[in-house]
Image (spheres, grey):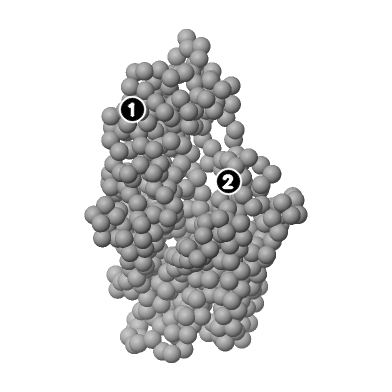
Amino acid sequence: MATVTTTTPRARGMTKGERFVILASSLGTVFEWYDFYLYGSLAAIIGAQFFSAYPPATRDIFALLAFAAGFLVRPFGAIVFGRIGDIVGRKYTFLVTILIMGLSTFIVGLLPNAATIGIAAPIILIGLRLLQGLALGGEYGGAATYVAEHSPPGKRGYYTSFIQTTATLGLFMSLLVILFTRTMLGEKTFADWGWRIPFLVSVALLAISVWIRMQLNESPAFQRMKEEGTHSKAPLTESFGRWDNAKIALLALLGLVAGQGVVWYTGQFYALFFLQSILKVDGYTANLLIAWSLAFGTIFFVVFGALSDRIGRKPIILSGCLIAALTFFPIFKQITTLANPALEKAIETVKVTVVANPKDCGDLFNPVGTRVFSSSCDKARALLARSSVKYDTKLDSAATATSVMINGKPVAYDAAKAADSDKAVVASVQAAGYPKAGDPGIVKMTGVFDIFRGQVAGIIGLLFILVIYVTMVYGPMAAALVELFPTRIRYTSMSLPYHIGNGWFGGLLPATAFAMVAQTGDIYFGLWYPIVFAIMTFVIGMIFIPETKDRDIYADDVRH
């Protein structure tokens, strides 16, 4: 069926009612992201509270797995709540999702730890994380659809871009609340019980969000269809059981959202991980660096959303994917130069090689962190990866033991005496030039406004560029997805590719990228993950994704 376009878009200012729609939809979504990211920001403390029966390293793994569970179930939330949204209505559905998210978060703040109620604590915690992921899977599609269906033609990119700021603002808010609470209580009190406060205060945010959303009316496009009896009775079947619609959803995933997801998670989450875990920047400084880059860059979600109303969604999103793919390597290398110059020098000058029998060396790929390595070769390489040491592996069938060659000098590694071997290897690589955590050369911020020193300002500038890429690919995304699908199945159809692209392609990026670093011994190798998917999206999007900015989303025959 032919695409219907508008020929006379209304060029006018935003009405009071439209401002309220954006405020209500965006504010609630900000609070949902705040709730979702609290857990990730406090994963180490939560691991100690709820997985205390296990060794420290295992606790952290379980805590991160529980965090990942929230990402993995997001597409299922998109299916469940997308269907309800297309049958019952947009307003009702995202009112339900915010209640589920808010109450789940509040209960985490009240939940007794493992020392009090034993194994029930982590089981309940994981159940709450699953509920949060399901709720978030239903929230975004509802908010984006609701705002888009209230937007005048020619302004959808601008109006929906406010929804696109919510994930970043939610992360920003969670970081600020955590930093404030830590500062007020001190680290010991915060680790003991103060970590609960950010979860508990979310109930006030929930009350505000629910009250505001109760004032909203149903989307006019959906209300009209419901009154006419033309809304979908089986949106899942219609969206994914018919090839003409399922094909669009698949192309939206591969030609828009997958690339957007990896660029977004690289620019915000992997950048934070890279600073802390690879460059050994302390957590306070790393969080402040990211927070400042977000503060400077968030407005550009709206800038690129509005620009997409003029030049189109496709050119901005795909350009963002391509530019990011071409520049990730130089940007992250320059971040290393500024944040930890001694590490950069050591990578260039210190030659480290693990020499072992091929039978002793296995696959180190461990994206979910659950594998336990037992051989000397694997333990030695895993140690070097954790220590941000660039290394090569030399397989020698004549070798009877594993050794780590550091500038030609061997250090024996014995898995049976792993603790002693770890100390010997770490001491040798540090003696050769690799820095220790806390060394004077590593960037450190002593206050929130300590941003004008050359080293700090340079890193914030580089992180700001990464955030600009995020705003390019994400700012116009809601409008692009809304415009691809007809009103009767829009909530369901757009939600699933969005949450697969962001929850799976993006959400699993930090763990997978670090697993690639560990496997190869190259601290930059993990960047190939976002680069490959960003280029894939650019190619598929250029060939198969149509420009949609002039489509009439109120016409029920908006199709390819």
Name the foreground residue: 370 vs 72.
370
Classify 224 as above or below 291. below
Instruction: Choose mark 2 or mark 1, whichever is in front.
Output: 1
Say which mark, if any, is on residue 60: 2
Q: Is residue 186 visible?
A: yes
Write down the quadrant of residue 394 in the picture: top left
Q: Earlier in the sequence, mark 2 or mark 1?
A: 2
Write down the quadrant of residue 135 in the picture: bottom right
Kindly identify the residue that appears in the image at 42 percent across and 74 percent down: 162
Name the foreground residue: 451 vs 300.
451
Classify 498 as above or below 352. below
**Local crowd size for mark 1, using a 10 Å CA cut-off: few (<14), some (14–19), many (≥20):** some
Q: Secondary structure at mark 2?
A: helix
Identity, as a three-letter code, of the amino acid under mark 1: Ala
Residue 124 position, x and y percent, is: 71, 57
Kindly identify the residue that appears in the image at 50 percent across and 65 percent down: 184
Give the Cα distance between marks 2 and 1: 30 Å
